[in-house]
Image: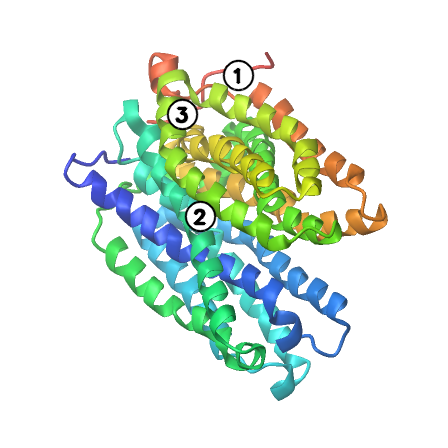
Amino acid sequence: MTTQLTRASLPRTVAASVIGTVAEYYDFFIYGTASALVFNKVFFPAVSPLLGTLAAFSTYAVGFFARPLGGIVWGHVGDRLGRRRTLVYTLLLTGLGTFAVGLMPGYAQIGVWAPVVLVLVRLVQGFGVGGEQGGAVLLTAEAAPAARRGFYASFVQLGSPAAYLIPSALFALLDARMSERDFVAWGWRIPFLLSAVVVLVGLYVRLRVRETFQPGREHRAPLKVLMRDHRREVVAGTLTKFVEAAVFPFYTVFLVSYAKSQGVDSGTVLDGVIVAIVAELVLLPVWGLLTDRVGRRPVYLAATVLNLVLVVPGFLAIQTGNAVVITLLLVAGLAFGHGATYAPQASYFPELFPAGARYSGVSIVWQFGSMIASGPFTVVAAALLAASGGGFTLDAVYVGVLILISLVALRWMPETAPRARGGEYAGWATDSRPATEGQPA
C-alpha cells in the first residue's frame, strides 16, 4: 500500500530524496575523480603510469558490477520493510565505505594489499548505491499527486549531476592550492573524509520524512511477482536505460580522454562539462513537467534520437578545439540529450510496477542497465580508441549501438503518465497483472 503525502510534507520528502541522492553519488563520483587524478600513484605505483591509470579505472568499474546485486537485495528489503528504512541503510553503507578510503594506507605502506582492500571497499560502495536510486525516486514518486508525479520525481535526479560537480570542484581546489607531493601524500584524502559530513546531513533529512509504503502479507515475494507478471517491463526497462547510462560517461569522461588524444586542452572540455551540467540541473524539472503533459515515452524517445544524432558531432566538436563549439555540443548532449532521458526515469520506471514489487523492479532495471551500458564504458571506449589509432569510428559505433538498443526497446514500453493515458497504468495502485499494451508500434 502506498501513501500520498499532504502538500505540506511533500517538499520535505522531495528534499530528503535529493539530499540523500547527492550524498550517495558524492561517494560514488568522488572515487571516479580520484581514479583519474591520483589513485594510480597511491595504489598502483609498481606499474607504468598508463597501466596504473587503467587499473584505477578498472577498480572504478568494479563498483558498477556490485550494483545489480545491491539492487536485488535492497529492492527486496525495500518491498518488505519499507522505503525510508532501506534508504538509511544504503546511505550508511556507501558513506562509511567512502570514509574508509580516506583512511586507507597506500601501496607504500602495505604493498599489494592496498589495491586489494580498495577493490573490496569499492564493492561495498557499489552494493550500497545499488539500492539508493530506486528507493529515492520511489519515496518521491509515491508521495506525489499522480498528475504531477513526473515533475516532483524529476527533482530526485538533480542529485546525481550535483554530486558530480562537488567532487570535481573539491579536487580542483585542492590540486590548485597544494603541491603535487602534498596532494598525492595526503591532500586527496580530504574529500573522502568530508563524506562523513555529507552522510550526516543526508541521514538527518531522511530520518525526518514519512514512509510512503506500508508492506503487507502480499509483499513477501517481490522477485516472484516480477518474473511471473512483469518480465516484459523488466527487460524492456533495462534496455531503455542503456542510452542514459552510456551517454553520461561519454560526455563527462570519455570525451575528455579523446581531447587529450587529439592534442586538445582537456581543461576546455571539463569547463564545458561543468557548464552543461549546470544547464542540466536547471532543465531536469522542465523535462519532468513535460512528461506529465505529453507523456513519458515521447520525451524519452525524442531525447534518445537526439543522443544518436549527436554522437559523431561530439567527436568533431572536440577536434575543433574551439571552447564555444565544445560547450554548445556538451550542453546539447547533457542538458537536452541526457537530461530528457534521465528526468523521465524517476516516474516512468516506478509506474511500470505494482507497489509490492516496485522497489525491486526499479532497482533491477536501473542497476542492470547501468552495469551493462555504463560499467565497462570507459574501459571499452579507451580500448577501442587505442585499437583504432586515435580514430573515433569504433567508439561512435559502440555508443551508437547502445543508443539504438534503447530506441528499439522503447517500442515495447507502454505509456504510463496518468494524464496521457487518461488514468493510472494498471500496475501502479495494485499487485495485479498489468494491462496488455505497449506492443511494438
Q: Secondary structure at mark 3?
A: loop
Amino acid type at mark 2: Ser
> Between tags 3 and 1, which lies in front?
1
Residue at mark 2 to residue at mark 3: CA–CA distance: 28 Å
> Between tags 2 and 1, which lies in front?
2
Amino acid type at mark 1: Gly
Could you say where residue 134 lies in the image, as x and y percent from the top left? 43, 43
Could you say where residue 13 lies in the image, as x and y percent from the top left? 25, 44
Q: Secondary structure at mark 1?
A: loop
Q: Residue at x 64, y 74 (%)?
A: 116
**Neighbour tally class for label 2: few under 14, some 14-19, many 20 plus, Cα within 10 Å:** many
Viewer-closest of 127 and 382: 382
Q: Residue at x 53, y 16 (%)?
A: 438
Q: Secondary structure at mark 2?
A: helix
* Sequence-earlier tag: 3 or 1: 3
Q: Residue at x 42, y 57 (%)?
A: 166
Q: Which mark is residue 427?
A: 3
Residue at mark 3 to residue at mark 1: CA–CA distance: 13 Å
| Residue holding disc 1 | 438
Q: Which mark is residue 160?
A: 2
Cβ atoms under marks 2 and 1 closer than 8 Å: no
**Neighbour tally class for label 1: few under 14, some 14-19, many 20 plus, Cα within 10 Å:** some
Q: Is residue 325 left or right of residue 13?
A: right
Viewer-closest of 259 and 338: 259
* Sequence-earlier tag: 2 or 1: 2
State the quadrant of the N terminus.
Answer: top left
State the quadrant of the C terminus.
Answer: top right
Q: How many dots with numbers?
A: 3
